Amino acid sequence: MRHGRFIARYFHTKWFERNHLSEDLKGRSVQGGVRTVGAQLFSFTVNIVTTIFLARLLLPEDYGLIAMVTAFTGFILIFKDLGMAQAIIQKDGLTQRLVSMVFWFNFFVSILLGLIIVAMGPLLVWFYDEPRLFNIAALYSFAALFGGLSTQHSALLSRQMKFGELASITMAASFFSLMPALYMAWAGYGYWALVAINILNPAITCVMLWVKCDWRPSFSRIDSRIKEMVGFGAGISGFSMINYFSRNLDNVLIGRYIGTDALGLYSKAYQILMLPITQLRDPLNAVGIPALSALAKEPEKFRNYYREYVFLLAFFSMPIVVFLFVTANPIILFLLGENWIQAAGIFQLLAITAFIQPVASSRGMVMIASGLSTRYFFWGVWNAIFVTIAFVAGIQFGLNGLVIAYAISNYLILIPSLYYCFHKTPVRVKDFFVTIAPVTFISLVAGVFLYAVYVRLPELNLWLEIFVLGLVYGLSYVILWLPMPSTRARLTGVVGLARSILKK
């Protein structure tokens, strides 16, 4: 009893006293963004280097096999925390007992999910008529266990805005999971190298989160108070479930009706396209959600912070996608080699959707920070319906048809979805479009100029060609911000942010 009281008292006075946000929210956000983006840049570099080597050691079929499994196991793993990590980040007045209850609840759920993944192996073998999937699925069950053991520690560090610790974990997990995979691919283990990445990363992350986070769960009985946490998390978890289904139905349909080679090309093209975007979007989200949650009772500050967030995300993500669209052929050849050149066309079609997708995903951040988890879930349902219709209709026309249908559906639902998601929040639909309009225009104009240079460029070494095109596009993009005072002021703001980052 004395031990339990000591833990509870320590938890309240030491842990959560450190948990309150400082008044200088912008400064905390910038510091967190610097550290998190730094970690993401490191992970991005490691991923790119590894991709270059793995693509030359493995076959599209190897990636197709893994995509067949992860399309299903990823769906199961959504339930490892039931959305309660976001509840831990947002909820006021946390106690040792409440967080411990959430931990043990998640832990028991993760064991159940691991068993479900193992049991799913024979179904995957039957569905795809591919015996190798059984053992792959069995090993993926460990990812559920590691996730359940580390979710609360990650959420508590995010709540405290301890992004330096999270950044170091991201870097270590990326490096120490990818290096063994390179050796396995070189030694001829084939798709098992990819399995190793997906098991080692959560395992290393779990161990390091326990080392970096000084909180430990106490043994407390799960009681009715868990219902509030589950209630908030249900909307987020429900959205994640529906969203994952709609986002991965393409992999299921391609693997089932076209084959492993086509799925390998598609999944790799999608991965490369999303790699730089996620390295930018994920750290911004990690900083943005806690910051917006702290401003939930100050509508004007909430709205201004959101506009700055969306502008920063658009300023970098949109030109990146345009550049990748124009230079698809040299990018694929450089990263993957000649055996993957068929992925270039898929890569370009996927870029049409990726142009708007990062900024459009800010809809969810607004709803989560505003506590609208139920609306978040229903938005996921409607989005899943439209995307599913697009995939089913598009697959009738082959792989390219599916990708084109997906792009059309994303643009058709953009405006209606913004009105629905922003309703009764501090953010207005006008805020979204006014913020991204100059970035959209300048990115596309710079892209037209880049294409004119690209078609006239003499034949060069691949890395030199990409460097020259990147330099041309980067300079033209920056120059186009200079003529008008309003856009020039925006560029000055980004430069000011960069200076503050360098100082920190």
Image (tube, rainbow, N blue to C red):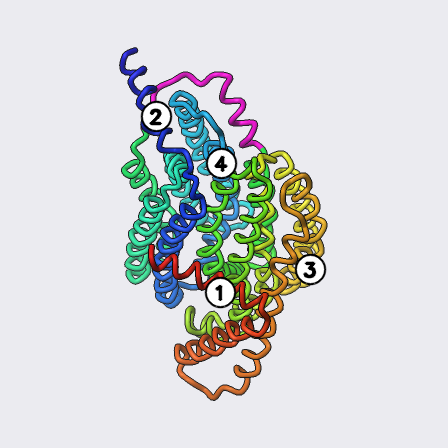
User: Which of label 1 and label 2 is nearer to you?
Assistant: 1
Place residue 299 in its image quadrant: top right
Disc 3: CA contacts within 10 A as few (<14), some (14-19) or many (>=20): some
Q: Position of residue 51 (x, y in %)?
A: 39, 63
Q: Label 2's element? A: loop
User: Which of label 4 and label 1 is nearer to you?
Assistant: 1
Q: Label 4's element? A: helix
Q: Earlier in the sequence, mark 3 or mark 4?
A: 4
Left or right: where 148 falls relative to 68 = left
Mark-to-mark CA distance, 2 and 4: 18 Å
- What segment carries the magenta color? 216-234
Mark-to-mark CA distance, 4 and 1: 34 Å
Q: What residue did someone put label 3 on?
A: 408
Q: Are marks 2 and 4 in contact (CB under 8 Å)?
A: no
| Point 57% across, 49% down: residue | 304
Q: What residue did someone put label 4 on?
A: 86
Judge by depth and name the residue closer to the eye, 163 or 389: 163
Judge by depth and name the residue closer to the eye, 383 or 346: 383
Image height of 471 relative to 110, above or below? below
Q: Earlier in the sequence, mark 3 or mark 2?
A: 2
Disc 1: CA contacts within 10 A as few (<14), some (14-19) or many (>=20): some
Res. 217 mark: 2
Judge by depth and name the residue closer to the eye, 390 or 299: 299
Which amino acid, by three-letter code, is at mark 4?
Gln
| Point 62% across, 38% down: residue | 377
Mark-to-mark CA distance, 1 and 2: 47 Å
Which amino acid, by three-letter code, is at mark 3?
Ile
Q: Earlier in the sequence, mark 1 or mark 2?
A: 2
Which amino acid, by three-letter code, is at mark 1?
Thr
Q: What residue did someone put label 1 on?
A: 492
Disc 2: CA contacts within 10 A as few (<14), some (14-19) or many (>=20): some
